[in-house]
Image (spheres, rainbow, N blue to C red):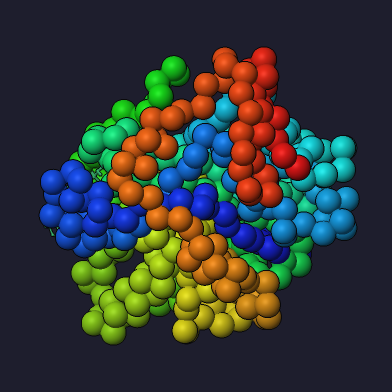
Amino acid sequence: MNVGIDKMNFFVPPYYVDMTDLAIARDVDPNKFLIGIGQEQMAVSPKSQDIVTFAANAAKQLLTPEDLAAIDMVIVGTETSIDESKASAVVLHRLLGVQPFARSFEIKEACYGATAGVQLAKSHVRANPDSKVLVIASDIARYGLNSGGEPTQGAGAVAMLISRDPRILVLEEQNAMLTQDIYDFWRPVGHQYPLVDGPLSNATYIDSFQKVWKHYQAKYQRSLADFDALAFHIPYTKMGKKALLSILETESESEQARMLASYEESIVYSRKVGNLYTGSLYLGLISLLENSNTLAAGSRIGLFSYGSGAVSEFFSGTLVEGYEAFLAKEDHQMLLNNRHKLSIDEYEAMFNDALDIDTAATFEDALPFSITAIEGTIRTYRQ
Ligand code: HMG
Protein backbone atom coordinates (compact mmCIF):
# COMPACT_ATOMS: atom_id res chain seq x y z
CA MET A 1 0.00 0.00 0.00
CA ASN A 2 1.30 3.47 -0.87
CA VAL A 3 1.16 6.06 1.92
CA GLY A 4 2.32 9.65 1.74
CA ILE A 5 1.45 13.32 1.29
CA ASP A 6 -1.98 13.65 -0.28
CA LYS A 7 -2.28 17.43 0.06
CA MET A 8 -0.03 20.19 1.37
CA ASN A 9 -0.17 23.95 1.81
CA PHE A 10 1.72 26.71 3.59
CA PHE A 11 0.76 29.96 5.29
CA VAL A 12 2.93 32.89 6.34
CA PRO A 13 1.79 36.06 8.16
CA PRO A 14 1.06 39.10 5.98
CA TYR A 15 4.07 41.22 7.07
CA TYR A 16 7.75 41.13 6.16
CA VAL A 17 10.98 43.04 6.54
CA ASP A 18 13.32 43.66 3.62
CA MET A 19 16.76 42.29 4.48
CA THR A 20 18.57 45.22 2.88
CA ASP A 21 16.65 47.59 5.20
CA LEU A 22 17.51 45.40 8.18
CA ALA A 23 21.21 45.27 7.22
CA ILE A 24 21.37 49.07 6.87
CA ALA A 25 19.63 49.54 10.24
CA ARG A 26 22.10 47.12 11.87
CA ASP A 27 25.11 48.73 10.15
CA VAL A 28 25.93 45.53 8.25
CA ASP A 29 26.87 45.17 4.56
CA PRO A 30 23.54 44.10 2.91
CA ASN A 31 25.42 41.42 0.95
CA LYS A 32 26.08 39.60 4.19
CA PHE A 33 22.33 39.00 4.55
CA LEU A 34 21.51 38.71 0.83
CA ILE A 35 24.47 36.51 -0.20
CA GLY A 36 26.25 35.36 2.99
CA ILE A 37 23.02 34.26 4.72
CA GLY A 38 20.96 34.06 1.52
CA GLN A 39 17.81 35.87 2.67
CA GLU A 40 15.88 38.64 0.85
CA GLN A 41 12.86 39.06 3.11
CA MET A 42 11.79 37.87 6.56
CA ALA A 43 8.24 37.11 7.73
CA VAL A 44 7.08 38.95 10.86
CA SER A 45 3.95 38.14 12.88
CA PRO A 46 1.72 40.47 14.94
CA LYS A 47 0.36 39.55 18.38
CA SER A 48 -3.08 38.70 16.98
CA GLN A 49 -1.55 35.62 15.30
CA ASP A 50 0.09 32.55 16.79
CA ILE A 51 0.93 28.97 15.84
CA VAL A 52 -2.75 27.98 16.02
CA THR A 53 -3.89 30.68 13.58
CA PHE A 54 -0.98 29.95 11.19
CA ALA A 55 -1.86 26.25 11.32
CA ALA A 56 -5.59 26.83 10.79
CA ASN A 57 -4.96 29.26 7.93
CA ALA A 58 -2.64 26.70 6.29
CA ALA A 59 -4.96 23.72 6.77
CA LYS A 60 -8.46 25.10 6.24
CA GLN A 61 -8.45 25.31 2.46
CA LEU A 62 -7.03 21.79 2.12
CA LEU A 63 -9.74 19.89 3.91
CA THR A 64 -13.01 18.65 2.39
CA PRO A 65 -15.93 17.32 4.53
CA GLU A 66 -14.75 13.79 3.59
CA ASP A 67 -11.25 14.57 4.91
CA LEU A 68 -12.66 15.99 8.17
CA ALA A 69 -14.68 12.78 8.65
CA ALA A 70 -11.66 10.52 7.94
CA ILE A 71 -8.98 12.33 9.97
CA ASP A 72 -8.45 10.49 13.28
CA MET A 73 -5.16 12.10 14.30
CA VAL A 74 -4.08 15.75 14.39
CA ILE A 75 -0.36 16.27 15.03
CA VAL A 76 1.32 19.65 15.46
CA GLY A 77 5.11 19.76 15.30
CA THR A 78 6.23 22.97 17.02
CA GLU A 79 8.79 24.55 19.31
CA THR A 80 6.61 27.65 19.85
CA SER A 81 3.96 26.03 22.06
CA ILE A 82 1.39 28.37 23.58
CA ASP A 83 0.85 26.15 26.63
CA GLU A 84 3.08 23.82 28.67
CA SER A 85 0.27 21.24 29.01
CA LYS A 86 -2.58 21.57 26.51
CA ALA A 87 -1.63 20.84 22.91
CA SER A 88 -2.38 23.41 20.20
CA ALA A 89 -3.61 20.45 18.12
CA VAL A 90 -6.66 20.18 20.42
CA VAL A 91 -7.70 23.77 19.64
CA LEU A 92 -6.95 23.24 15.97
CA HIS A 93 -9.07 20.08 15.93
CA ARG A 94 -12.08 22.21 16.98
CA LEU A 95 -11.34 25.21 14.75
CA LEU A 96 -11.06 22.99 11.67
CA GLY A 97 -14.11 20.85 12.49
CA VAL A 98 -12.38 17.43 12.57
CA GLN A 99 -14.70 14.57 13.68
CA PRO A 100 -14.45 14.06 17.47
CA PHE A 101 -13.06 10.49 17.69
CA ALA A 102 -9.47 11.50 17.08
CA ARG A 103 -6.08 11.83 18.80
CA SER A 104 -4.69 15.39 18.92
CA PHE A 105 -1.25 16.24 20.28
CA GLU A 106 2.02 18.13 19.81
CA ILE A 107 5.49 16.77 19.11
CA LYS A 108 8.63 18.64 20.10
CA GLU A 109 12.22 18.18 18.99
CA ALA A 110 13.25 21.59 17.66
CA CYS A 111 12.86 21.75 13.86
CA TYR A 112 12.60 17.94 13.59
CA GLY A 113 9.16 17.71 15.32
CA ALA A 114 7.00 17.70 12.20
CA THR A 115 9.10 14.96 10.59
CA ALA A 116 8.49 12.77 13.64
CA GLY A 117 4.80 13.56 13.03
CA VAL A 118 4.97 12.61 9.35
CA GLN A 119 6.67 9.29 10.15
CA LEU A 120 4.17 8.49 12.90
CA ALA A 121 1.31 9.40 10.55
CA LYS A 122 2.73 7.08 7.89
CA SER A 123 2.84 4.14 10.34
CA HIS A 124 -0.68 4.93 11.57
CA VAL A 125 -2.15 4.96 8.05
CA ARG A 126 -0.28 1.71 7.22
CA ALA A 127 -2.03 0.08 10.20
CA ASN A 128 -5.38 1.82 9.54
CA PRO A 129 -5.71 2.26 5.77
CA ASP A 130 -8.96 4.27 5.92
CA SER A 131 -7.50 6.86 8.31
CA LYS A 132 -6.14 10.23 7.32
CA VAL A 133 -3.74 12.18 9.52
CA LEU A 134 -3.33 15.94 9.56
CA VAL A 135 0.28 16.90 10.31
CA ILE A 136 1.07 20.58 10.78
CA ALA A 137 4.40 22.28 11.32
CA SER A 138 3.86 25.72 12.87
CA ASP A 139 6.34 28.10 14.50
CA ILE A 140 7.52 31.62 15.14
CA ALA A 141 11.32 31.80 14.86
CA ARG A 142 12.62 34.67 16.99
CA TYR A 143 16.06 35.35 18.44
CA GLY A 144 15.59 38.98 19.55
CA LEU A 145 16.24 42.42 18.06
CA ASN A 146 19.94 43.08 17.38
CA SER A 147 20.81 39.44 18.19
CA GLY A 148 23.19 37.28 16.13
CA GLY A 149 20.28 35.16 14.94
CA GLU A 150 18.05 38.14 14.00
CA PRO A 151 18.55 37.79 10.20
CA THR A 152 17.49 34.12 10.43
CA GLN A 153 14.05 34.70 12.00
CA GLY A 154 10.71 33.94 10.31
CA ALA A 155 7.18 32.62 10.95
CA GLY A 156 4.56 30.39 9.39
CA ALA A 157 3.07 26.92 9.02
CA VAL A 158 2.89 24.01 6.60
CA ALA A 159 -0.11 21.66 6.69
CA MET A 160 0.02 18.14 5.23
CA LEU A 161 -2.64 15.48 4.88
CA ILE A 162 -1.14 11.98 5.09
CA SER A 163 -3.22 9.18 3.58
CA ARG A 164 -3.06 5.99 1.53
CA ASP A 165 -2.93 6.41 -2.27
CA PRO A 166 -1.56 9.95 -1.83
CA ARG A 167 -1.83 12.32 -4.76
CA ILE A 168 1.45 14.25 -4.31
CA LEU A 169 4.30 12.20 -2.78
CA VAL A 170 4.55 8.52 -1.85
CA LEU A 171 6.80 8.24 1.22
CA GLU A 172 9.31 5.41 0.79
CA GLU A 173 10.27 2.95 3.54
CA GLN A 174 14.00 3.80 3.52
CA ASN A 175 15.12 6.13 6.35
CA ALA A 176 18.34 6.95 8.17
CA MET A 177 18.05 8.67 11.57
CA LEU A 178 20.59 10.15 13.98
CA THR A 179 20.45 11.45 17.57
CA GLN A 180 23.35 13.38 19.10
CA ASP A 181 23.05 15.15 22.49
CA ILE A 182 24.51 18.57 21.59
CA TYR A 183 23.73 22.11 22.83
CA ASP A 184 23.83 24.01 19.54
CA PHE A 185 20.41 25.68 19.96
CA TRP A 186 18.03 25.24 22.88
CA ARG A 187 15.37 27.17 24.82
CA PRO A 188 15.20 26.43 28.55
CA VAL A 189 11.67 26.54 30.01
CA GLY A 190 10.73 30.16 30.75
CA HIS A 191 13.15 31.70 28.25
CA GLN A 192 11.49 33.87 25.64
CA TYR A 193 14.20 33.32 22.99
CA PRO A 194 16.45 30.36 22.24
CA LEU A 195 20.09 30.26 23.22
CA VAL A 196 22.24 29.48 20.22
CA ASP A 197 25.85 28.71 19.44
CA GLY A 198 25.73 29.77 15.78
CA PRO A 199 29.01 28.23 14.55
CA LEU A 200 28.32 24.97 16.44
CA SER A 201 24.78 24.83 15.01
CA ASN A 202 26.11 25.23 11.47
CA ALA A 203 28.77 22.57 12.04
CA THR A 204 26.32 20.13 13.68
CA TYR A 205 23.85 20.57 10.83
CA ILE A 206 26.51 19.71 8.22
CA ASP A 207 27.97 16.87 10.30
CA SER A 208 24.48 15.40 10.85
CA PHE A 209 23.70 15.58 7.14
CA GLN A 210 26.94 13.88 6.20
CA LYS A 211 26.38 11.12 8.78
CA VAL A 212 22.76 10.31 7.87
CA TRP A 213 23.52 10.49 4.16
CA LYS A 214 26.47 8.12 4.53
CA HIS A 215 24.40 5.77 6.70
CA TYR A 216 21.52 5.86 4.23
CA GLN A 217 23.82 5.13 1.28
CA ALA A 218 25.41 2.17 3.05
CA LYS A 219 22.05 0.83 4.28
CA TYR A 220 20.26 0.97 0.93
CA GLN A 221 23.07 1.02 -1.69
CA ARG A 222 21.71 4.26 -3.09
CA SER A 223 23.77 7.18 -4.42
CA LEU A 224 23.02 10.74 -5.57
CA ALA A 225 22.26 9.35 -9.03
CA ASP A 226 19.14 7.72 -7.53
CA PHE A 227 17.69 11.14 -6.63
CA ASP A 228 16.13 13.77 -8.88
CA ALA A 229 16.41 16.45 -6.18
CA LEU A 230 17.09 16.92 -2.49
CA ALA A 231 15.10 19.14 -0.12
CA PHE A 232 16.71 20.41 3.11
CA HIS A 233 15.68 21.94 6.39
CA ILE A 234 16.33 25.61 5.57
CA PRO A 235 17.08 27.80 8.62
CA TYR A 236 18.51 30.26 6.07
CA THR A 237 19.05 29.43 2.44
CA LYS A 238 22.86 29.33 2.56
CA MET A 239 22.76 26.56 5.21
CA GLY A 240 21.36 23.73 3.10
CA LYS A 241 23.67 24.74 0.27
CA LYS A 242 26.71 24.40 2.52
CA ALA A 243 25.60 20.90 3.53
CA LEU A 244 24.88 19.95 -0.08
CA LEU A 245 28.26 21.27 -1.28
CA SER A 246 29.98 19.14 1.37
CA ILE A 247 28.88 15.94 -0.40
CA LEU A 248 29.31 17.21 -3.97
CA GLU A 249 33.12 17.46 -3.97
CA THR A 250 33.55 13.93 -5.33
CA GLU A 251 30.74 14.21 -7.89
CA SER A 252 31.09 15.04 -11.61
CA GLU A 253 30.53 18.61 -12.80
CA SER A 254 27.20 17.72 -14.39
CA GLU A 255 26.00 15.99 -11.21
CA GLN A 256 27.00 19.04 -9.15
CA ALA A 257 25.15 21.35 -11.54
CA ARG A 258 22.03 19.16 -11.48
CA MET A 259 21.87 19.07 -7.67
CA LEU A 260 22.65 22.77 -7.24
CA ALA A 261 19.98 23.76 -9.80
CA SER A 262 17.29 21.84 -7.93
CA TYR A 263 18.54 23.28 -4.62
CA GLU A 264 17.86 26.78 -6.01
CA GLU A 265 14.30 25.70 -6.88
CA SER A 266 13.77 24.51 -3.30
CA ILE A 267 14.69 27.86 -1.69
CA VAL A 268 12.53 30.27 -3.72
CA TYR A 269 9.96 30.64 -0.92
CA SER A 270 12.36 30.41 2.05
CA ARG A 271 14.40 33.35 0.69
CA LYS A 272 11.26 35.45 1.18
CA VAL A 273 10.13 34.21 4.60
CA GLY A 274 13.14 32.99 6.59
CA ASN A 275 13.10 30.14 9.07
CA LEU A 276 9.76 28.43 9.81
CA TYR A 277 11.58 26.02 12.19
CA THR A 278 9.48 22.79 11.91
CA GLY A 279 7.96 23.90 8.59
CA SER A 280 11.17 24.86 6.79
CA LEU A 281 11.89 21.47 5.20
CA TYR A 282 8.31 21.19 3.97
CA LEU A 283 8.23 24.77 2.67
CA GLY A 284 11.38 23.78 0.75
CA LEU A 285 9.58 20.74 -0.64
CA ILE A 286 6.60 22.88 -1.79
CA SER A 287 9.00 25.40 -3.36
CA LEU A 288 10.82 22.60 -5.19
CA LEU A 289 7.61 21.06 -6.55
CA GLU A 290 6.15 24.42 -7.61
CA ASN A 291 9.31 25.86 -9.17
CA SER A 292 11.05 22.86 -10.73
CA ASN A 293 11.43 22.53 -14.50
CA THR A 294 12.75 18.97 -14.37
CA LEU A 295 10.71 16.97 -11.88
CA ALA A 296 8.00 14.63 -13.15
CA ALA A 297 5.86 11.73 -11.98
CA GLY A 298 8.15 9.04 -10.57
CA SER A 299 10.94 11.49 -9.63
CA ARG A 300 12.58 10.58 -6.33
CA ILE A 301 13.17 13.40 -3.81
CA GLY A 302 15.47 13.02 -0.80
CA LEU A 303 14.51 14.98 2.32
CA PHE A 304 16.90 16.04 5.08
CA SER A 305 15.22 17.00 8.33
CA TYR A 306 17.31 18.59 11.11
CA GLY A 307 16.31 19.65 14.60
CA SER A 308 18.88 21.20 16.89
CA GLY A 309 19.76 19.34 19.99
CA ALA A 310 20.12 17.28 17.72
CA VAL A 311 17.96 14.82 15.77
CA SER A 312 18.11 14.40 12.02
CA GLU A 313 16.67 12.10 9.40
CA PHE A 314 17.18 11.47 5.71
CA PHE A 315 14.17 9.93 3.97
CA SER A 316 12.64 9.97 0.53
CA GLY A 317 9.51 10.02 -1.57
CA THR A 318 8.45 9.62 -5.19
CA LEU A 319 6.14 11.95 -7.07
CA VAL A 320 2.71 10.66 -8.07
CA GLU A 321 1.27 10.92 -11.60
CA GLY A 322 -0.76 14.17 -11.78
CA TYR A 323 0.80 15.68 -8.61
CA GLU A 324 0.91 19.14 -10.25
CA ALA A 325 -2.90 19.43 -9.98
CA PHE A 326 -2.59 19.36 -6.17
CA LEU A 327 -0.16 22.27 -5.91
CA ALA A 328 -1.20 25.91 -5.51
CA LYS A 329 1.62 27.93 -7.07
CA GLU A 330 -0.51 30.95 -7.97
CA ASP A 331 -2.11 31.14 -4.51
CA HIS A 332 1.31 30.88 -2.87
CA GLN A 333 2.78 33.61 -5.04
CA MET A 334 -0.21 35.82 -4.23
CA LEU A 335 0.20 35.12 -0.51
CA LEU A 336 3.85 36.21 -0.68
CA ASN A 337 3.33 39.16 -3.04
CA ASN A 338 0.36 40.61 -1.14
CA ARG A 339 2.26 40.93 2.15
CA HIS A 340 2.83 44.35 3.66
CA LYS A 341 6.43 45.53 3.89
CA LEU A 342 7.29 46.91 7.33
CA SER A 343 9.78 49.70 7.94
CA ILE A 344 12.41 48.79 10.54
CA ASP A 345 10.62 51.02 13.08
CA GLU A 346 7.33 49.20 12.41
CA TYR A 347 9.05 45.80 12.63
CA GLU A 348 10.68 46.68 15.96
CA ALA A 349 7.38 48.03 17.31
CA MET A 350 5.54 44.84 16.24
CA PHE A 351 8.32 42.70 17.71
CA ASN A 352 8.22 44.50 21.07
CA ASP A 353 4.42 44.52 21.23
CA ALA A 354 4.27 40.95 22.57
CA LEU A 355 1.04 39.19 23.52
CA ASP A 356 0.39 39.36 27.28
CA ILE A 357 -1.91 36.47 28.15
CA ASP A 358 -2.39 37.76 31.71
CA THR A 359 -4.11 40.95 30.53
CA ALA A 360 -7.61 40.88 29.03
CA ALA A 361 -7.66 42.39 25.54
CA THR A 362 -9.40 42.30 22.15
CA PHE A 363 -7.76 42.38 18.70
CA GLU A 364 -8.67 43.35 15.14
CA ASP A 365 -7.19 41.21 12.38
CA ALA A 366 -8.52 40.57 8.87
CA LEU A 367 -7.19 37.01 8.51
CA PRO A 368 -9.72 34.13 8.33
CA PHE A 369 -8.24 32.76 11.57
CA SER A 370 -6.81 35.11 14.18
CA ILE A 371 -6.86 35.75 17.92
CA THR A 372 -9.83 37.98 18.70
CA ALA A 373 -9.56 38.20 22.50
CA ILE A 374 -7.66 37.20 25.63
CA GLU A 375 -9.75 36.55 28.73
CA GLY A 376 -8.50 34.77 31.87
CA THR A 377 -5.30 33.66 29.99
CA ILE A 378 -7.45 31.90 27.35
CA ARG A 379 -7.19 32.87 23.68
CA THR A 380 -10.41 33.20 21.68
CA TYR A 381 -9.99 32.59 17.97
CA ARG A 382 -12.13 33.87 15.11
CA GLN A 383 -13.46 30.91 13.18
P1 HMG B 1 27.08 35.55 11.86
O1 HMG B 1 28.18 35.50 12.85
O2 HMG B 1 26.21 36.75 11.85
O3 HMG B 1 27.58 35.42 10.38
O4 HMG B 1 26.21 34.23 12.12
P2 HMG B 1 28.98 34.95 9.78
O5 HMG B 1 30.02 35.92 10.16
O6 HMG B 1 29.17 33.48 10.07
O7 HMG B 1 28.66 35.17 8.24
C1 HMG B 1 27.66 34.44 7.60
C2 HMG B 1 28.09 34.29 6.16
O8 HMG B 1 28.03 35.56 5.51
C3 HMG B 1 29.54 33.78 5.99
O9 HMG B 1 29.52 32.92 4.88
C4 HMG B 1 30.29 35.06 5.62
O10 HMG B 1 31.47 34.83 4.89
C5 HMG B 1 29.25 35.78 4.79
P3 HMG B 1 30.03 31.37 5.05
O11 HMG B 1 31.43 31.43 5.44
O12 HMG B 1 29.16 30.80 6.16
O13 HMG B 1 29.74 30.77 3.74
N1 HMG B 1 29.45 37.22 4.65
C6 HMG B 1 29.30 37.88 3.49
N2 HMG B 1 28.98 37.46 2.25
C7 HMG B 1 28.88 38.42 1.27
N3 HMG B 1 29.14 39.73 1.47
C8 HMG B 1 29.48 40.18 2.69
C9 HMG B 1 29.59 39.24 3.77
N4 HMG B 1 29.87 39.36 5.09
C10 HMG B 1 29.80 38.11 5.61
N5 HMG B 1 29.72 41.48 2.88
C11 HMG B 1 24.46 32.62 11.89
C12 HMG B 1 25.33 33.64 11.17
C13 HMG B 1 23.62 31.87 10.88
C14 HMG B 1 25.34 31.62 12.67
C15 HMG B 1 23.53 33.38 12.89
O14 HMG B 1 22.64 34.19 12.18
C16 HMG B 1 22.74 32.44 13.80
O15 HMG B 1 23.21 32.10 14.88
N6 HMG B 1 21.49 32.03 13.39
C17 HMG B 1 20.68 31.10 14.18
C18 HMG B 1 21.23 29.68 14.17
C19 HMG B 1 21.04 28.97 12.83
O16 HMG B 1 20.22 29.32 12.02
N7 HMG B 1 21.80 27.87 12.64
C20 HMG B 1 21.67 27.04 11.46
C21 HMG B 1 21.93 25.58 11.73
S1 HMG B 1 21.01 24.98 13.12
C22 HMG B 1 19.41 24.69 12.52
O17 HMG B 1 19.20 24.68 11.34
C23 HMG B 1 18.33 24.48 13.53
C24 HMG B 1 17.41 25.67 13.75
O18 HMG B 1 16.52 25.80 12.66
C25 HMG B 1 16.66 25.52 15.06
C26 HMG B 1 15.89 24.23 15.33
O19 HMG B 1 16.26 23.13 14.99
O20 HMG B 1 14.86 24.38 16.01
C27 HMG B 1 18.18 26.97 13.87
Residue 177 can be seen in this image: no
Residue 143 in percent (x, y) is at 33, 35
Residue plotted at (63% across, 53% down) = 58
Q: Is residue 155 above or below residue 38?
A: above
Residue 102 in percent (x, y) is at 82, 38
Residue plotted at (51% across, 63% down) = 338
Depth order, front residue of 168/20: 20
Depth order, front residue of 220/301: 301
Residue 63 in percent (x, y) is at 77, 57
Residue plotted at (34% across, 37% down) = 348
In the shown orientation, is residue 323 left or right of residue 293? right
Residue 142 in percent (x, y) is at 38, 37
Q: Is residue 77 above or below residue 237?
A: above
Q: Is residue 85 above or below residue 229?
A: above
Q: How many marks?
A: 0
Residue plotted at (62% across, 71% down) = 327
Q: Is residue 242 above or below residue 192?
A: below
**Residue 381 location, quadrant:** top right
In the shown orientation, is residue 41 left or right of residue 97? left
**Residue 297 location, quadrant:** bottom right
**Residue 196 location, quadrant:** top left
Looking at the rendered image, the quarter that the N terminus falls into is bottom right
Looking at the rendered image, the quarter that the C terminus falls into is top right
In the shown orientation, is residue 355 left or right of residue 56? left
Residue 47 can be seen in this image: yes
